[in-house]
Amino acid sequence: MAVVPAPRRAARHRFRLPFSGWHLLLMPLSLLFVLPLVQMVLTSFMSDSDINRFPPRFIPRHLYLAGYAGLFTESHVLRWLVNTIVVSAIAVLAHLVLCSMAGYGFARLKFAGRNVGFFLMVATVMIPTQLLMIPTYLMFARLGIVDTLAAAFVPWLASAFGIFLMRQFFLALPVELEEAAALEGATVWQIFLRIVLPLARPALATLALFTLLSSWNDLVWPLIAISNEKWYTLQVGLTMFQGTRRTQWSLLMAGNVVATMPLIIAFIAAQRRFVATMTFSGLKG
Amino acid sequence: MTFGFATDRPAPPRVVRRPAARGWRRGLRRAATGWAFAGPATAIVVGLSVFPAAWAFLISRTKWNGISPARDVGWGNYQTMAQDPELAAAVGHTLWLTALFVPSSILLGMLIAVALNRKIRFSGFYRTCIFVPYVASAAATGILATFVFNPQFGVANDTLRRLHLPTQQFLESRHEALLVIVVIALWGEIGFTSVIYLAALQDIPAELTEAASVDGAGRWRVFWHVVLPELRAVTVFTAVWQTITAIQLFDLVYTTTRGGPLQSSETVVYYMYELAFQTQRFGYGSAVAYGLFAVTMLLTLGIFWYSRRAKVEAF
């Protein structure tokens, strides 16, 4: 392994960029952003005596699994994880189906009431969540879905953002393909399913990622509508845990790891898509 | 993609053209198809916002704890708001938080984006590092922050000690709690603004900056006179977005201080949550929520109006 062929080495050298002063800014900043998360993971493997010492220790002396053991035996964390996965899966699926359909309807179909419907839908963006908390809670109570998982996923079935995103994407697609298919006698549904949706994959990926992120991380709706421990999502479970185990840091950090790592890993795996997505998400236009 | 539609530039948005097929023109059937597509999602979005918002207005004109019958108090709750010292304090905290958070997140986001846009090594790695906190939930971030800023054995104070600086109480201090919350919020949100700015920077045609350089403009002048004007639209967008984020910041307050110590970090949103879900004052809580809605809308419209006047097309 020590003998590296000289030509390849030279080729590598050619592509090496000169040192830039910007590293002096970006390196410490990157550390500042990542180190707390690294510490979160490391702390979850520490014993409480290791954590509560002075000065604090960053690297665990031994690998303690007591935090995780406590987390899994003393709480319903596995259940919370399953609940969260169910909520996010329903949210993502519903978003993909409903928002792409509505986006296509508003972008391409002409029908009575379209503009009114679209305007009403866009106007809802200005209504802050906080205004909706009380009546939504009361509404859920009347529907009998307080203290069920439905309370956590119903608010995430569709969103104005999702509809808008899909509409923008469909508007930018060239219309000729659809026209040609229509001339050949294809129905609207056939055109939508066979031609438009396959072209919309990047937009659907964006939508899925954003919905996953916001439904997984949502605290407000499950917090106000779910008080039965069995139906907590991870975020609610964590905050409840925090209230009762204030000083059991390894346990709290283990909970944090379970709640954040699935998304962080998914993000790092899909980050090309994710960042490309942010840039295209219509946030600019 | 074999049809050759994968063009380099997205086609400009088109007005919906009348489709050639005749069957589509039959009004009723068209409406049925249209609403079959757009109806379900629209019904959910509107049903979960416009309807509850209207209901909230009715509730805001009552005194109600959710159990005993509601009593109509007219505009009473809105009058109470004007004389509520706790609300006034909460408004002050929210304003502080917004005034600190929005400009910092814009400036830092822009700076980081400019740095990430240079062709240097590891820029992909740096970008990942800076973006990752955005993915972590606000609840987890808040819990992690109470650990990092723990006055006794947190890393923040340990660092200060090593630098021979006085240690701080951070979230447990009346004077620092709000500031620390801003710092934590920035940690979580900067990744978002940086990526937005990065995208905007990459959209600026290279010819523009090159032409300026050829004409003898220094780096700083190129940035100031060429790049910055190109970033105006995205700045307006970011300002609106981050203002709303700051005003509605709830999860972080809930998981770090719960408004304390001594209500020093109680924001309007948190106060509203306490009114409604801790003390069951649904009527007054709704009135406060409407007040917040009005202010948010005025601010948003204000920024729009300003950007329209300045001829920036942000949306």
Image (cartoon, coloured by chain):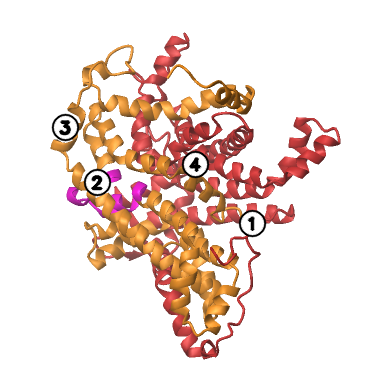
Chain colours: A orange, B red
Reading the chain from its start, which is encountered first: label 3 or label 2?
3
Image point (16%, 32%), residue name: A70
Q: CA distance from mark 4 to mark 1?
A: 45 Å
Q: Nearer the viewer, mark 2 or mark 1?
A: 1
In the rendered image, residue A224 lying in the magenta stretch gets the answer yes
Indicate which disc residue A70 carries: 3
x and y percentages locating residue A7 in the rendered image? 58, 24
Q: Secondary structure at mark 3?
A: helix
Is residue B196 depicted above or below A206 in this figure? above
x and y percentages locating residue A68 in the rendered image? 20, 32
Q: Quadrant of residue B52?
A: bottom left
Quadrant, the C terminus of chain B: bottom right
Q: Is the C-beta separation of discs 2 and 1 under 8 Å?
A: no
Indicate which disc residue B8 carries: 1
x and y percentages locating residue B281 in the rendered image? 33, 54
**Chain label for disc 2:** A
| Type of amino acid at the residue the image marks with label 2 | Leu
Is residue A106 depicted above or below A206 in this figure? below
Q: Nearer the viewer, mark 4 or mark 2?
A: 2
In magenta, the rendered stretch is: A216-236
Q: Which residue is mark 4?
A: B94
Q: CA distance from mark 4 to mark 2?
A: 33 Å
Q: Secondary structure at mark 2?
A: helix
Indicate which disc residue A81 carries: 2
Q: CA distance from mark 2 to mark 1?
A: 42 Å
In the rendered image, residue A81 lying in the magenta stretch gets the answer no
| Type of amino acid at the residue the image marks with label 4 | Thr
Is residue A236 depicted above or below B38 in this figure? above
Query: Are the residues under marks 2 and 1 on the same chain?
Result: no
**Chain label for disc 4:** B
